[in-house]
Image: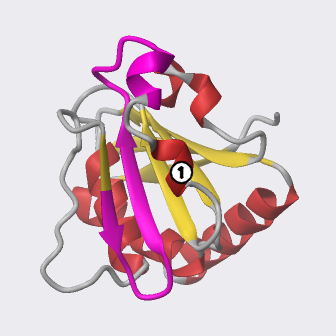
Amino acid sequence: MGHGTRLLLETPEKMLALGQRLGAILFDGAVIGLSGPLGAGKTTLARGIADGMRIDDGYVVSSPTYTIMQSYPCLERVLHHLDLYRITGSDDLDSTGYRDHVGGNTVLIVEWPEREPSVLTSENLIINIDYREKGRDVTLLPAGDLYEKLVEQLVSKELSTR
């Protein structure tokens, strides 16, 4: 695992925009882990990803802290949003049945993946979000060729929009 690609995002709008660009280029079966302290912007990023995936009208991504998993129909695939903040172990997680929904034409976003790393497939993209004095420090950590290409594509778009 390399050092990752770092971006500084000054506003929640930029976090949302990053998510929108990422959502627009995701592929079937993609697994994205979102790490960072409470309030850092994980759900904002997830909301952007859903927008980029063209989430169906009438659905709004909210943090699934209490339900552990929420699913959202999008244009070409279903988005499963897992929040592990409150889980107490893998049994808790298995009770959600999330494994039945992974792969195929789905995208899985996992908040707090460090609480149950077995959730992640061996190839994935971890996005670490950290507080900075001005905005958020976002580090993209791809594991596997598909995800490295995804990050390259995302970042080349990022740079070309300035």
Tally of numbered discs: 1
Residue at (17% x, 67% y) in the render: 60
- Tell me the amino acid under the disc marked 1: Asp
Furthest residue to the left?
58
Residue at (75% x, 35% y) in the render: 3
Please determine whether, in this image, residue 155 is positioned above or below residue 92: below
Image side of residue 124 versus residue 85, left or right: right
Q: Where is residue 106 in the image (x, y as percent from the top left)?
A: 54, 67
- Say whether residue 21 is magenta: no
Camera-nearest residue between 134 and 70: 70
Residue at (55% x, 44% y) in the render: 99
Q: Where is residue 24 in the image (x, y as percent from the top left)?
A: 51, 81
- Say whether residue 75 is magenta: yes
Image side of residue 76 versus residue 146, left or right: left
Colour scheme shown: secondary structure
Q: Where is residue 112 in the image (x, y as percent from the top left)?
A: 42, 29
Q: What stretch is highlighted in magenta?
A: 71-94
Please determine whether, in this image, residue 17 is positioned above or below residue 129: below
Residue 39 visible here: yes
User: Which residue in the protein does label 1 denote?
Assistant: 100
Please determine whether, in this image, residue 57 is positioned above or below residue 136: below
Image side of residue 117 versus residue 132, left or right: right
